[in-house]
Image (cartoon, rainbow, N blue to C red):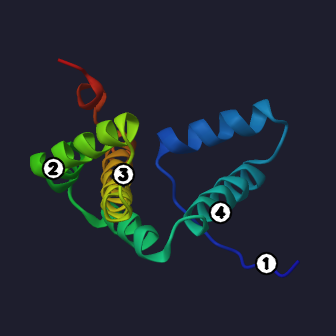
Amino acid sequence: MNTHPVMVNLPKRLYTRVERRAKLTDRSVESELLDAVARAMQAEDDLPEVLSTLLGELSLLDDKALWRSARAGMKASESAQLEKLHLKRQRVGLSDPESQILASLVRQYEKTMLIRAQSAALLKQRGHDVSRLFAFA
C-alpha cells in the first residue's frame, strides 16, 4: 500500500479518547485514527457532492453561525404544506404533481435536518452543551 506520512496535532481530550478506544480494541493509536478518517470519508462519499460540500463548509463557521444553523428549520409555510400533503397521501392519495412537490419538500426537510445535525455535532466537538437543541417544550 502506498502511504503518506501526516503529522497531526490533536487536542489532548480528543487524543485521550482515541487512545482509550485503541486500547479497548487492542490496536495502535495510528490504526484507530486511520479507521476514523476512513469512516468519515466513506460517510462523505455516500452523500451527493453538493450536500457533502455544504456539510463540510459548516466546519468553517464560527460558533455563533453554527448555533443559528443548528436551530434553523423549514419555513412555516413549507412545513405546513409538507404536513398537509402527507395527510392527504394517507387519506386519498396524491396526484403526480402533488407527489413531486411532496418529494421536493421531503428532500428539503432532510437537507435541513442534516445541516442541523452536523452543526450540533460540530458545536459538541467544540465543547458546547447542545442538549437544549433536543429539548422538547
Look at mark 2 in the image and give the residue it sits on: 68
| Gap between marks 4 and 2 measured at Cα | 27 Å
Q: Badge 1 local density, few (<14 within 10 Å), some, or many (20+)?
A: few
Point out the frontmost of discs 1 and 3: 3
Point out the frontmost of discs 2 and 3: 3
Q: Dividing the image into 4 quarters, which one contains the C terminus?
A: top left
Q: Earlier in the sequence, mark 2 or mark 1?
A: 1
| Gap between marks 1 and 4 measured at Cα | 18 Å
**Tag 3: amino acid:** Leu
> Dot 3 lies on which element?
loop
Look at mark 1 in the image and give the residue it sits on: 3
> Dot 2 lies on which element?
helix
Residue 127, visible in the rendered structure: no
Residue 50: x and y in percent read 41, 75
Residue 102: x and y in percent read 33, 55
**Tag 4: amino acid:** Gln
| Gap between marks 3 and 4 measured at Cα | 36 Å
Look at mark 4 in the image and give the residue it sits on: 42
Look at mark 3 in the image and give the residue it sits on: 94
Q: Dividing the image into 4 quarters, which one contains the N terminus?
A: bottom right
